[in-house]
Amino acid sequence: MDTQREKFLWGDIHEEAGKERVEEGGPMEVYGTTALLAALFNITVGMWIFRKNPHSKVAHRFLIATILLAVWGAAEALTKFSPNEQMSLLWVKISYVPFFILLAVLYYVVHYASEGRWRTIYYISRVLYVAFIMLLFTDSFIQKTSATPYGYEPVYGWIFPYFAFTHMAMMALGISLLYAVRMKWKGLGRIHQIDVMIYTFVISMVFVYTFELLSPLFGWGLPKIGSVFSIFITIVSRRTYIQYSHVIFPTLQKQVSTNDALCGALCSVCTSFYAGRCKSCAMGEEKKREKCTIYLCAKEHATNCPTCGRMLTCETYRDHREECPFLDPVKVLPSGISYRIESVDYTAGRKIFRDRMIRGDFGLVVSREHPDIFFSTWEMEQPPLIWLSHEEEKRWTINPTSLAKLTHIIDDFIKKVPFSCVLFEGIEYLVIYNSFDTIMKLVCSVDEEVTQNKCRFILSYDPRAFDEEKCAILERDLRQIPESYAVDG
Protein backbone atom coordinates (compact mmCIF):
# COMPACT_ATOMS: atom_id res chain seq x y z
CA MET A 1 0.00 0.00 0.00
CA ASP A 2 2.84 2.37 0.81
CA THR A 3 4.38 1.76 -2.61
CA GLN A 4 1.08 2.49 -4.35
CA ARG A 5 0.50 5.67 -2.39
CA GLU A 6 4.04 6.85 -3.10
CA LYS A 7 3.52 6.21 -6.77
CA PHE A 8 0.15 7.86 -7.06
CA LEU A 9 0.48 10.68 -4.54
CA TRP A 10 2.62 12.29 -1.93
CA GLY A 11 3.02 9.35 0.45
CA ASP A 12 4.18 9.28 4.03
CA ILE A 13 7.63 10.80 3.45
CA HIS A 14 6.11 14.25 2.82
CA GLU A 15 3.38 14.12 5.43
CA GLU A 16 5.26 15.33 8.50
CA ALA A 17 7.00 18.13 6.66
CA GLY A 18 3.72 18.94 4.98
CA LYS A 19 1.87 19.38 8.25
CA GLU A 20 4.41 21.93 9.40
CA ARG A 21 4.08 23.87 6.15
CA VAL A 22 0.27 23.77 6.38
CA GLU A 23 0.42 25.27 9.83
CA GLU A 24 2.94 27.93 8.81
CA GLY A 25 1.41 28.82 5.44
CA GLY A 26 3.89 29.16 2.57
CA PRO A 27 3.20 27.66 -0.89
CA MET A 28 -0.30 26.56 0.05
CA GLU A 29 -1.33 30.22 0.41
CA VAL A 30 -0.02 30.98 -3.06
CA TYR A 31 -1.72 28.04 -4.76
CA GLY A 32 -4.90 28.36 -2.73
CA THR A 33 -5.17 32.07 -3.49
CA THR A 34 -4.49 31.46 -7.19
CA ALA A 35 -7.28 28.89 -7.41
CA LEU A 36 -9.65 31.23 -5.58
CA LEU A 37 -8.82 34.14 -7.92
CA ALA A 38 -9.45 31.89 -10.91
CA ALA A 39 -12.85 30.99 -9.47
CA LEU A 40 -13.74 34.66 -8.96
CA PHE A 41 -12.62 35.48 -12.50
CA ASN A 42 -14.77 32.74 -14.05
CA ILE A 43 -17.93 33.67 -12.17
CA THR A 44 -17.38 37.39 -12.84
CA VAL A 45 -17.11 36.84 -16.60
CA GLY A 46 -20.18 34.61 -16.56
CA MET A 47 -22.26 37.17 -14.67
CA TRP A 48 -21.02 39.98 -16.92
CA ILE A 49 -22.08 38.11 -20.06
CA PHE A 50 -25.42 37.23 -18.51
CA ARG A 51 -26.12 40.83 -17.46
CA LYS A 52 -25.46 41.99 -21.00
CA ASN A 53 -27.81 39.33 -22.43
CA PRO A 54 -30.24 38.44 -19.62
CA HIS A 55 -32.82 37.01 -22.02
CA SER A 56 -30.34 34.88 -23.97
CA LYS A 57 -30.38 31.16 -23.30
CA VAL A 58 -26.85 30.94 -24.66
CA ALA A 59 -25.70 33.45 -22.05
CA HIS A 60 -27.66 31.53 -19.42
CA ARG A 61 -25.84 28.29 -20.27
CA PHE A 62 -22.53 30.10 -20.37
CA LEU A 63 -23.24 31.38 -16.86
CA ILE A 64 -23.94 27.84 -15.65
CA ALA A 65 -20.64 26.66 -17.14
CA THR A 66 -18.70 29.44 -15.40
CA ILE A 67 -20.46 28.63 -12.12
CA LEU A 68 -19.22 25.04 -12.41
CA LEU A 69 -15.69 26.28 -13.08
CA ALA A 70 -15.96 28.66 -10.13
CA VAL A 71 -17.10 25.84 -7.82
CA TRP A 72 -14.17 23.77 -9.03
CA GLY A 73 -11.68 26.54 -8.26
CA ALA A 74 -13.24 27.51 -4.94
CA ALA A 75 -13.27 23.88 -3.76
CA GLU A 76 -9.60 23.46 -4.67
CA ALA A 77 -8.75 26.65 -2.80
CA LEU A 78 -10.71 25.56 0.28
CA THR A 79 -8.93 22.20 0.17
CA LYS A 80 -5.63 24.05 0.58
CA PHE A 81 -6.96 26.30 3.33
CA SER A 82 -8.82 23.60 5.29
CA PRO A 83 -7.96 23.45 9.03
CA ASN A 84 -7.99 19.65 9.17
CA GLU A 85 -8.04 16.50 7.06
CA GLN A 86 -11.79 15.93 7.42
CA MET A 87 -12.69 19.30 5.91
CA SER A 88 -10.07 19.02 3.19
CA LEU A 89 -11.41 15.58 2.22
CA LEU A 90 -14.91 17.02 1.77
CA TRP A 91 -13.70 19.92 -0.36
CA VAL A 92 -11.42 17.83 -2.56
CA LYS A 93 -14.34 15.52 -3.36
CA ILE A 94 -16.54 18.49 -4.22
CA SER A 95 -13.79 19.84 -6.49
CA TYR A 96 -14.04 16.74 -8.67
CA VAL A 97 -17.78 17.09 -9.37
CA PRO A 98 -17.40 19.93 -11.96
CA PHE A 99 -14.38 18.09 -13.37
CA PHE A 100 -16.59 15.06 -14.07
CA ILE A 101 -19.36 17.19 -15.58
CA LEU A 102 -16.82 18.80 -17.94
CA LEU A 103 -16.96 15.72 -20.17
CA ALA A 104 -20.74 15.94 -20.48
CA VAL A 105 -20.48 19.64 -21.37
CA LEU A 106 -18.03 18.85 -24.17
CA TYR A 107 -20.24 16.12 -25.61
CA TYR A 108 -23.25 18.40 -25.28
CA VAL A 109 -21.52 20.86 -27.63
CA VAL A 110 -20.42 18.05 -29.96
CA HIS A 111 -23.93 16.58 -30.10
CA TYR A 112 -25.68 19.81 -31.06
CA ALA A 113 -22.89 21.18 -33.25
CA SER A 114 -23.18 17.99 -35.33
CA GLU A 115 -26.96 18.51 -35.60
CA GLY A 116 -27.87 15.49 -33.49
CA ARG A 117 -25.18 13.00 -34.45
CA TRP A 118 -23.31 10.85 -31.90
CA ARG A 119 -26.32 10.82 -29.64
CA THR A 120 -25.21 7.52 -28.05
CA ILE A 121 -21.81 8.86 -27.04
CA TYR A 122 -23.47 11.97 -25.65
CA TYR A 123 -25.66 9.89 -23.34
CA ILE A 124 -22.72 7.68 -22.39
CA SER A 125 -20.84 10.78 -21.20
CA ARG A 126 -23.80 11.70 -19.01
CA VAL A 127 -23.98 8.22 -17.52
CA LEU A 128 -20.23 8.25 -16.89
CA TYR A 129 -20.19 11.48 -14.90
CA VAL A 130 -23.11 10.25 -12.75
CA ALA A 131 -21.22 7.01 -12.11
CA PHE A 132 -18.02 8.92 -11.32
CA ILE A 133 -19.84 11.12 -8.82
CA MET A 134 -21.29 8.05 -7.09
CA LEU A 135 -17.81 6.50 -6.82
CA LEU A 136 -16.37 9.80 -5.65
CA PHE A 137 -17.82 9.42 -2.17
CA THR A 138 -16.26 6.01 -1.62
CA ASP A 139 -12.76 5.13 -0.44
CA SER A 140 -12.10 3.46 -3.78
CA PHE A 141 -11.56 6.84 -5.43
CA ILE A 142 -10.13 9.04 -2.66
CA GLN A 143 -8.99 7.41 0.56
CA LYS A 144 -8.06 10.51 2.52
CA THR A 145 -6.06 13.72 2.29
CA SER A 146 -2.43 14.18 3.22
CA ALA A 147 -0.64 17.31 4.41
CA THR A 148 1.98 18.50 1.89
CA PRO A 149 4.02 21.66 1.35
CA TYR A 150 1.18 22.80 -0.98
CA GLY A 151 -1.57 22.23 1.56
CA TYR A 152 -3.79 19.18 1.80
CA GLU A 153 -3.67 16.87 -1.23
CA PRO A 154 -5.81 13.77 -1.93
CA VAL A 155 -4.55 10.23 -1.48
CA TYR A 156 -6.24 8.20 -4.22
CA GLY A 157 -7.65 4.69 -4.13
CA TRP A 158 -7.35 1.77 -6.52
CA ILE A 159 -9.98 3.00 -8.98
CA PHE A 160 -8.27 6.33 -9.70
CA PRO A 161 -5.97 5.09 -12.54
CA TYR A 162 -8.95 3.59 -14.38
CA PHE A 163 -10.90 6.80 -13.98
CA ALA A 164 -7.97 8.90 -15.18
CA PHE A 165 -7.43 6.95 -18.39
CA THR A 166 -11.18 6.75 -19.08
CA HIS A 167 -11.58 10.51 -18.61
CA MET A 168 -8.61 11.35 -20.86
CA ALA A 169 -9.73 8.90 -23.56
CA MET A 170 -13.27 10.31 -23.58
CA MET A 171 -11.90 13.86 -23.68
CA ALA A 172 -9.61 13.05 -26.62
CA LEU A 173 -12.51 11.43 -28.48
CA GLY A 174 -14.79 14.40 -27.80
CA ILE A 175 -12.23 16.92 -29.04
CA SER A 176 -11.63 14.82 -32.18
CA LEU A 177 -15.35 14.68 -32.93
CA LEU A 178 -15.72 18.42 -32.35
CA TYR A 179 -12.86 19.18 -34.71
CA ALA A 180 -14.37 16.84 -37.32
CA VAL A 181 -17.61 18.84 -37.09
CA ARG A 182 -15.70 22.11 -37.38
CA MET A 183 -14.01 20.94 -40.62
CA LYS A 184 -17.45 20.53 -42.20
CA TRP A 185 -18.52 24.10 -41.49
CA LYS A 186 -18.35 25.95 -44.77
CA GLY A 187 -17.38 29.58 -44.96
CA LEU A 188 -14.96 29.59 -42.03
CA GLY A 189 -11.44 30.83 -42.68
CA ARG A 190 -8.40 28.61 -42.24
CA ILE A 191 -7.87 30.02 -38.75
CA HIS A 192 -11.23 31.10 -37.42
CA GLN A 193 -12.12 32.36 -33.96
CA ILE A 194 -13.81 29.01 -33.34
CA ASP A 195 -10.48 27.31 -34.09
CA VAL A 196 -8.77 29.51 -31.53
CA MET A 197 -11.36 28.45 -28.96
CA ILE A 198 -10.81 24.75 -29.72
CA TYR A 199 -7.01 25.03 -29.65
CA THR A 200 -7.07 26.97 -26.40
CA PHE A 201 -9.38 24.38 -24.88
CA VAL A 202 -6.98 21.58 -25.88
CA ILE A 203 -3.93 23.37 -24.48
CA SER A 204 -5.76 24.21 -21.26
CA MET A 205 -6.84 20.59 -20.83
CA VAL A 206 -3.23 19.44 -21.24
CA PHE A 207 -2.28 21.59 -18.24
CA VAL A 208 -5.39 20.51 -16.33
CA TYR A 209 -4.62 16.84 -16.83
CA THR A 210 -0.98 17.41 -15.89
CA PHE A 211 -1.92 18.79 -12.47
CA GLU A 212 -5.11 16.78 -11.85
CA LEU A 213 -4.33 13.30 -13.22
CA LEU A 214 -0.81 12.77 -14.59
CA SER A 215 1.02 14.18 -11.58
CA PRO A 216 -0.54 11.74 -9.06
CA LEU A 217 -0.29 8.87 -11.56
CA PHE A 218 3.43 9.29 -12.15
CA GLY A 219 4.43 10.82 -8.83
CA TRP A 220 5.48 14.22 -10.15
CA GLY A 221 4.52 15.96 -6.91
CA LEU A 222 2.55 18.85 -8.45
CA PRO A 223 -0.26 20.54 -6.50
CA LYS A 224 -3.89 19.90 -7.48
CA ILE A 225 -4.73 23.29 -9.02
CA GLY A 226 -6.04 22.34 -12.47
CA SER A 227 -8.94 24.78 -12.14
CA VAL A 228 -6.52 27.70 -12.55
CA PHE A 229 -6.11 26.89 -16.24
CA SER A 230 -9.86 27.07 -16.82
CA ILE A 231 -9.59 30.85 -17.03
CA PHE A 232 -8.05 30.53 -20.49
CA ILE A 233 -11.07 28.54 -21.64
CA THR A 234 -13.36 31.23 -20.21
CA ILE A 235 -11.42 34.04 -21.89
CA VAL A 236 -11.61 32.63 -25.43
CA SER A 237 -15.15 31.29 -24.98
CA ARG A 238 -16.45 34.60 -23.64
CA ARG A 239 -16.98 35.96 -27.12
CA THR A 240 -16.82 32.96 -29.44
CA TYR A 241 -19.45 30.81 -27.71
CA ILE A 242 -21.97 33.66 -27.67
CA GLN A 243 -21.16 35.28 -30.99
CA TYR A 244 -21.07 32.10 -33.08
CA SER A 245 -23.90 30.25 -31.37
CA HIS A 246 -25.73 30.11 -34.70
CA VAL A 247 -22.81 28.02 -36.01
CA ILE A 248 -22.18 25.89 -32.93
CA PHE A 249 -25.89 25.18 -32.32
CA PRO A 250 -27.47 25.10 -35.81
CA THR A 251 -30.36 22.78 -34.87
CA LEU A 252 -31.18 24.68 -31.69
CA GLN A 253 -30.76 28.19 -33.01
CA LYS A 254 -34.31 29.19 -32.10
CA GLN A 255 -33.91 27.92 -28.56
CA VAL A 256 -30.34 28.83 -27.63
CA SER A 257 -29.12 31.60 -29.91
CA THR A 258 -29.13 35.19 -28.78
CA ASN A 259 -32.00 37.49 -29.69
CA ASP A 260 -29.68 39.68 -31.78
CA ALA A 261 -29.90 39.44 -35.56
CA LEU A 262 -27.01 38.44 -37.82
CA CYS A 263 -27.21 41.83 -39.55
CA GLY A 264 -26.23 43.53 -36.28
CA ALA A 265 -29.65 44.61 -35.00
CA LEU A 266 -29.67 44.46 -31.19
CA CYS A 267 -33.05 42.82 -30.68
CA SER A 268 -32.00 41.79 -27.15
CA VAL A 269 -32.34 45.41 -25.95
CA CYS A 270 -35.18 46.50 -28.24
CA THR A 271 -38.38 47.66 -26.53
CA SER A 272 -40.48 46.75 -29.58
CA PHE A 273 -39.27 43.16 -29.33
CA TYR A 274 -40.21 42.87 -25.66
CA ALA A 275 -43.51 44.65 -26.25
CA GLY A 276 -44.37 41.99 -28.84
CA ARG A 277 -44.64 44.41 -31.78
CA CYS A 278 -41.57 43.08 -33.55
CA LYS A 279 -40.16 39.53 -33.61
CA SER A 280 -36.45 38.98 -33.28
CA CYS A 281 -34.83 37.51 -36.38
CA ALA A 282 -33.07 34.86 -34.28
CA MET A 283 -36.36 33.86 -32.64
CA GLY A 284 -38.51 34.01 -35.77
CA GLU A 285 -39.59 31.41 -38.29
CA GLU A 286 -36.86 29.90 -40.46
CA LYS A 287 -38.90 30.34 -43.65
CA LYS A 288 -39.29 34.03 -42.93
CA ARG A 289 -35.59 34.41 -42.11
CA GLU A 290 -34.64 32.84 -45.42
CA LYS A 291 -36.35 35.72 -47.22
CA CYS A 292 -33.56 37.97 -45.94
CA THR A 293 -30.54 38.10 -48.27
CA ILE A 294 -28.25 39.24 -45.46
CA TYR A 295 -29.29 36.33 -43.24
CA LEU A 296 -28.54 33.82 -46.01
CA CYS A 297 -25.17 35.44 -46.67
CA ALA A 298 -24.19 35.42 -42.99
CA LYS A 299 -25.31 31.82 -42.58
CA GLU A 300 -23.36 30.72 -45.66
CA HIS A 301 -20.15 32.32 -44.37
CA ALA A 302 -20.77 31.24 -40.74
CA THR A 303 -20.47 34.77 -39.40
CA ASN A 304 -22.51 37.89 -38.69
CA CYS A 305 -22.21 41.34 -40.21
CA PRO A 306 -20.59 43.19 -37.26
CA THR A 307 -17.66 40.75 -37.23
CA CYS A 308 -17.29 40.42 -40.99
CA GLY A 309 -14.23 42.26 -42.28
CA ARG A 310 -16.03 43.18 -45.49
CA MET A 311 -19.05 44.78 -43.89
CA LEU A 312 -18.28 48.42 -44.73
CA THR A 313 -17.72 47.61 -48.41
CA CYS A 314 -20.22 44.75 -48.75
CA GLU A 315 -22.70 45.35 -51.57
CA THR A 316 -25.08 42.76 -50.13
CA TYR A 317 -25.24 44.68 -46.87
CA ARG A 318 -25.71 48.05 -48.59
CA ASP A 319 -28.40 46.81 -50.98
CA HIS A 320 -30.47 44.72 -48.55
CA ARG A 321 -29.83 46.25 -45.13
CA GLU A 322 -33.36 47.64 -44.79
CA GLU A 323 -35.31 44.68 -46.16
CA CYS A 324 -35.78 42.91 -42.83
CA PRO A 325 -38.85 40.62 -43.02
CA PHE A 326 -39.37 41.05 -39.26
CA LEU A 327 -39.29 44.85 -39.28
CA ASP A 328 -42.05 46.57 -37.33
CA PRO A 329 -43.83 48.93 -39.79
CA VAL A 330 -44.04 51.53 -37.04
CA LYS A 331 -40.25 51.54 -36.84
CA VAL A 332 -39.66 52.50 -40.45
CA LEU A 333 -37.63 55.71 -40.64
CA PRO A 334 -36.68 56.23 -44.30
CA SER A 335 -32.97 56.63 -44.98
CA GLY A 336 -31.34 59.30 -47.11
CA ILE A 337 -33.19 62.05 -45.24
CA SER A 338 -32.18 64.73 -42.73
CA TYR A 339 -34.60 65.08 -39.84
CA ARG A 340 -35.25 67.69 -37.20
CA ILE A 341 -36.69 67.21 -33.75
CA GLU A 342 -37.61 69.92 -31.27
CA SER A 343 -36.61 69.04 -27.74
CA VAL A 344 -35.80 71.26 -24.79
CA ASP A 345 -33.53 68.68 -23.11
CA TYR A 346 -32.54 66.62 -26.19
CA THR A 347 -34.21 63.53 -24.71
CA ALA A 348 -36.47 62.80 -27.68
CA GLY A 349 -33.61 62.93 -30.17
CA ARG A 350 -31.46 60.66 -28.05
CA LYS A 351 -34.23 58.07 -27.78
CA ILE A 352 -34.59 57.96 -31.55
CA PHE A 353 -30.82 57.81 -32.05
CA ARG A 354 -30.55 54.92 -29.58
CA ASP A 355 -33.35 53.12 -31.39
CA ARG A 356 -31.53 53.50 -34.71
CA MET A 357 -28.39 51.98 -33.19
CA ILE A 358 -30.47 49.08 -31.89
CA ARG A 359 -31.74 48.66 -35.44
CA GLY A 360 -28.14 48.26 -36.60
CA ASP A 361 -27.23 51.78 -37.74
CA PHE A 362 -23.69 53.03 -37.13
CA GLY A 363 -23.86 56.06 -34.88
CA LEU A 364 -21.99 59.35 -34.61
CA VAL A 365 -22.86 62.01 -32.03
CA VAL A 366 -22.07 65.72 -32.10
CA SER A 367 -22.88 67.24 -28.74
CA ARG A 368 -22.09 70.03 -26.33
CA GLU A 369 -22.22 67.46 -23.54
CA HIS A 370 -19.08 65.68 -22.36
CA PRO A 371 -18.94 61.97 -23.37
CA ASP A 372 -18.81 60.81 -19.75
CA ILE A 373 -22.09 62.61 -19.07
CA PHE A 374 -23.74 61.75 -22.39
CA PHE A 375 -23.09 58.01 -21.99
CA SER A 376 -23.60 57.84 -18.22
CA THR A 377 -26.78 55.76 -18.65
CA TRP A 378 -25.80 54.14 -21.94
CA GLU A 379 -26.03 50.33 -21.75
CA MET A 380 -24.77 49.52 -25.27
CA GLU A 381 -21.46 49.93 -27.03
CA GLN A 382 -20.68 53.64 -27.18
CA PRO A 383 -20.58 55.27 -30.62
CA PRO A 384 -17.98 57.96 -31.38
CA LEU A 385 -18.84 61.39 -30.00
CA ILE A 386 -17.53 64.79 -31.06
CA TRP A 387 -17.52 67.17 -28.13
CA LEU A 388 -18.07 70.84 -29.03
CA SER A 389 -15.61 72.55 -26.72
CA HIS A 390 -12.69 74.96 -26.56
CA GLU A 391 -10.60 72.26 -24.83
CA GLU A 392 -8.98 70.96 -27.98
CA GLU A 393 -6.34 68.89 -26.22
CA LYS A 394 -8.66 65.91 -26.66
CA ARG A 395 -8.70 64.32 -30.11
CA TRP A 396 -12.50 64.00 -29.96
CA THR A 397 -13.13 67.71 -29.31
CA ILE A 398 -13.87 70.36 -31.92
CA ASN A 399 -13.64 74.08 -31.38
CA PRO A 400 -17.05 75.71 -32.07
CA THR A 401 -15.39 78.02 -34.57
CA SER A 402 -13.92 75.14 -36.61
CA LEU A 403 -17.01 74.44 -38.69
CA ALA A 404 -15.01 73.37 -41.75
CA LYS A 405 -13.27 70.68 -39.72
CA LEU A 406 -16.55 69.56 -38.19
CA THR A 407 -18.20 69.35 -41.62
CA HIS A 408 -15.31 67.29 -42.98
CA ILE A 409 -15.49 64.78 -40.11
CA ILE A 410 -19.24 64.26 -40.48
CA ASP A 411 -19.11 64.00 -44.28
CA ASP A 412 -16.20 61.56 -44.16
CA PHE A 413 -18.01 59.37 -41.62
CA ILE A 414 -21.16 59.25 -43.75
CA LYS A 415 -19.19 58.35 -46.90
CA LYS A 416 -17.26 55.52 -45.28
CA VAL A 417 -19.94 53.96 -43.08
CA PRO A 418 -23.06 52.46 -44.67
CA PHE A 419 -26.41 53.25 -43.07
CA SER A 420 -25.00 55.57 -40.46
CA CYS A 421 -27.08 57.81 -38.22
CA VAL A 422 -25.71 61.17 -37.06
CA LEU A 423 -27.21 62.86 -34.01
CA PHE A 424 -26.39 66.57 -34.00
CA GLU A 425 -26.91 68.56 -30.80
CA GLY A 426 -25.61 71.95 -29.76
CA ILE A 427 -26.57 74.13 -32.71
CA GLU A 428 -27.62 76.75 -30.14
CA TYR A 429 -24.04 76.76 -28.83
CA LEU A 430 -22.56 77.11 -32.33
CA VAL A 431 -24.71 80.16 -33.05
CA ILE A 432 -22.83 82.02 -30.30
CA TYR A 433 -19.57 81.77 -32.29
CA ASN A 434 -20.90 81.62 -35.87
CA SER A 435 -23.68 83.16 -37.89
CA PHE A 436 -26.85 81.19 -38.42
CA ASP A 437 -26.30 81.24 -42.20
CA THR A 438 -22.85 79.64 -41.78
CA ILE A 439 -24.30 76.88 -39.66
CA MET A 440 -27.05 76.22 -42.21
CA LYS A 441 -24.35 75.81 -44.87
CA LEU A 442 -22.91 73.02 -42.69
CA VAL A 443 -26.35 71.41 -42.38
CA CYS A 444 -26.99 71.60 -46.12
CA SER A 445 -23.57 70.12 -46.89
CA VAL A 446 -24.23 67.20 -44.58
CA ASP A 447 -27.73 66.78 -46.03
CA GLU A 448 -26.27 66.24 -49.51
CA GLU A 449 -24.03 63.44 -48.25
CA VAL A 450 -26.94 61.92 -46.34
CA THR A 451 -29.05 61.78 -49.49
CA GLN A 452 -26.31 60.21 -51.60
CA ASN A 453 -25.28 57.59 -49.04
CA LYS A 454 -28.69 56.51 -47.66
CA CYS A 455 -27.91 57.68 -44.14
CA ARG A 456 -29.89 59.55 -41.50
CA PHE A 457 -29.15 62.92 -39.95
CA ILE A 458 -31.06 64.03 -36.85
CA LEU A 459 -30.80 67.65 -35.74
CA SER A 460 -32.06 68.02 -32.18
CA TYR A 461 -32.55 71.59 -30.99
CA ASP A 462 -34.43 73.81 -28.56
CA PRO A 463 -36.87 75.97 -30.59
CA ARG A 464 -36.82 78.64 -27.88
CA ALA A 465 -33.27 79.56 -28.92
CA PHE A 466 -34.36 80.86 -32.35
CA ASP A 467 -36.82 83.40 -33.66
CA GLU A 468 -39.67 82.50 -35.99
CA GLU A 469 -37.66 83.21 -39.16
CA LYS A 470 -34.81 80.86 -38.21
CA CYS A 471 -37.25 78.17 -37.08
CA ALA A 472 -39.02 78.46 -40.43
CA ILE A 473 -35.70 77.87 -42.24
CA LEU A 474 -35.03 74.75 -40.18
CA GLU A 475 -38.55 73.48 -40.85
CA ARG A 476 -38.10 74.09 -44.56
CA ASP A 477 -34.73 72.35 -44.98
CA LEU A 478 -35.21 69.46 -42.55
CA ARG A 479 -38.03 66.95 -42.37
CA GLN A 480 -39.90 66.34 -39.14
CA ILE A 481 -39.70 62.89 -37.54
CA PRO A 482 -42.89 61.00 -38.49
CA GLU A 483 -45.41 60.91 -35.67
CA SER A 484 -45.90 57.20 -36.31
CA TYR A 485 -42.26 56.53 -35.43
CA ALA A 486 -42.91 55.61 -31.81
CA VAL A 487 -40.00 54.99 -29.46
CA ASP A 488 -40.57 53.49 -26.03
CA GLY A 489 -38.52 54.16 -22.91
Image: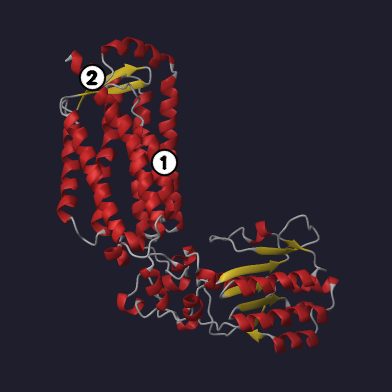
Residue type (three-letter) at the residue carrying disc 1:
Ile
Quarter of the image where the N terminus is located: top left
Question: Of the numbered discs in the image, which one, if any, rests on residue 119?
Answer: none
Which residue is at the front of the view, 315 or 426? 315
Q: Residues within 10 Å of mark 2 (few under 14, many from 20)?
A: some
Quarter of the rendering containing residue 94: top left
- Can the viewer see residue 48? yes
C-alpha separation, residue under disc 1 versus residue under disc 2 = 30 Å
Q: Residues within 10 Å of mark 1 (few under 14, many from 20)?
A: many
| Camera-side residue of 359 and 237 | 237
Residue highlighted by disc 1: 231
Residue under label 2, please give it.
7
**What is the tally of numbered marks visible in this picture?**
2
Please give the name of the residue rendered at 33% of the width and 53% of the height, measured from the top-left corner. Answer: 61
Q: Is residue 357 above or below residue 234?
A: below
Asked if the residue under mark 2 is in contact with the one under mark 1, i.e. CB atoms within 8 Å, the reply is: no
Instruction: Assign a secondary structure to mark 2.
Output: helix
Left or right: 485, with 389 as reference point: left
